[in-house]
Image (spheres, rainbow, N blue to C red):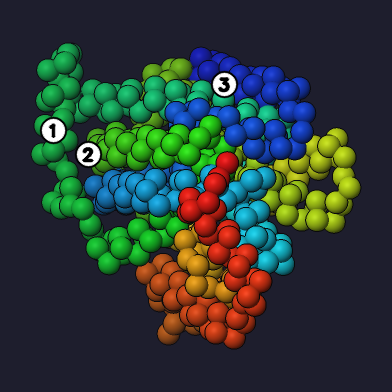
Amino acid sequence: MKGALSFPDFAVIAVFFTVMVGVGLFYSRRAKSSDQFFGGDKSVPWWLSGISFYMNSFSALAFVMYAALAYKFGWVPVTVSWLSVPAVLLGAWFLAVRWRRAAKTSPIDYVAERYTPGMCRTLAILGLPMQLLDNALKLLAIGTVVGVGMGFPLFWSICASGVIIVLYTFLGGLKATLTCDFIQFLVILAVVFTLPFACLRELAPPGTGVAGLVEGFRTFLEKTPDGFFAFTNGQYTWGYMLVFFCCVGSTLSTNWSLVQRYYTTKSEKDAQKMAYLVAALLFLGPPLFFFPAMAARVFLPPVAEADMNGVYALLCRAVLPAGMIGMVIAAMFSATMSSLAGNFNAAAAVAVNELYLKLDRNATERRRLVAARVATVLVGGLVVALTFVMQYAQGADDLFNLSNKVFGVFLPPIAIPMLCGILVRRFSRRSGMLALVGGIATGLVLFALGAKAEFAHLRQMVWIFPATSLATFAFFFVGSALFKDTPEERAQVNAFMDRISGKVGVR
């Protein structure tokens, strides 16, 4: 029966996971040092790094929260997704070369040179929770998809997903992550190009061929609600889009795993070429991704508000034959595994290089590699635990708004100091710490005030993100006025900025 999982579906999923674990095992014997485990020897081809960046920039959240938006509002998630294109292009023009010159062993190691070693450790301690929260949201999304698509209880779906991803990440290191990202990209392509045709066949008159697909598309256009193809809809106004652009731009510019993709390329030119490839993929992908969820509005029975996070899985079960549902579930896992594997590796790199090695300065290479794998397991375990906390805290709220609330509090105070560290000379070295801590404190206060009914709007992204951003910049200016650099400190800042801007020789 169409929609019921069969042996071919389970076989596809089993083969997929076997290949992923096999890649991890292959590279586990080739990672001889923590630098190789985290950095890939700065020898990654631009096209592979670009595909990995693209795979790391989204997860099953795209199949869950964005699909729910596509079913409900139509074109809105395409508009939201396209905001990433100018953000990545700005990164190619202004950040790609600087990131490759600034970062060495972890995405934030340059912070000790630009600001202070204490600022670097604090950023690691405060930044890790945001990475864990982000990853927990993604794991909750894949648990939701697998729970609906495979009929498993959500609890066991999250547990199984988390264990498999942690195992694969633990074994692989960065090179295995990149290889798996490419394989997972191909799996997703197969689904992205198959599912729209399956939806069109569902809308086409019975027994028709290619002409029927055209007729199915006409039926889709005729039966969609008014305003379904508007760029904005409901609460997703142009003002909302502007704030979200700043949010997604900050994420794509400073996310640890994405910064890692910049500084592991073979050359500075390759770092820019990688970003151009990502921008092209981010432009071409969204219409294909979200068309099935939009078409489901026409041929699926009405989906209740509480069930919209599972709309992508519901439509797959409605239109796909045996074997293809397994491919879709593999694609869902692909999106999340690539994102989580990259984030686990980057977060572990920060934990080891900026925290552990500062305490154990005489660690042998073997101990460093062991620490890298232990940190990966710890990061994964904490993400699984946080996923269950989020599941119970989610309530009736949708994943999209839940993720925005989390990022509204933590993202600006972390992203702004990271970006200012490679773009702005004038801020003093010790002002970064005040901006980081003050910005997060402001966000937490606003979030706490939002618990009261009269201040509930403060928890909305359109309020909390600009507020924490302005507070972070304000603390930067106040800190620079109160904690001025000594001549020696100013010379160190100038030397760093000259190096990453190309005014002096760079590697």
Q: Mark 2 points at which residue?
A: 298
Q: Position of residue 317 (x, y in %)?
A: 40, 29
Q: Mark 1 points at which residue?
A: 219
Q: Disc 3 residue type? A: Phe
Element class at badge 2: helix
Q: Distance between the residues labelled 1 and 3?
A: 36 Å
User: Answer yes or no: do the residues labelled 1 and 3 have beta carbons within 8 Å?
Assistant: no
User: Answer yes or no: do the residues labelled 3 and 2 have beta carbons within 8 Å?
Assistant: no
Element class at badge 1: helix
Q: In this view, does 107 lie above or below 341?
A: below
- Residue 36 is left or right of residue 440, and the answer is right
Q: Which residue is drawn at 80% across and 51% down?
A: 357
Q: How far apart are marks 2 and 1 (CA)?
A: 9 Å
* Residue 56 in view of the camera: no
Image depth: mark 3 or mark 2 in front: 3
User: Answer yes or no: do the residues labelled 2 and 1 have beta carbons within 8 Å?
Assistant: yes
Q: Which residue is drawn at 17% across and 13% down?
A: 209
Q: Mark 3 points at which residue?
A: 16
Q: Is residue 118 above or below residue 326?
A: below
Q: Which residue is drawn at 58% across and 29% down?
A: 43
- Residue 222 is left or right of residue 53, and the answer is left
Among the two numbered marks 1 and 3 on one chain, the one whose residue lies closer to the N terminus = 3
Q: Position of residue 478 (x, y in %)?
A: 53, 83
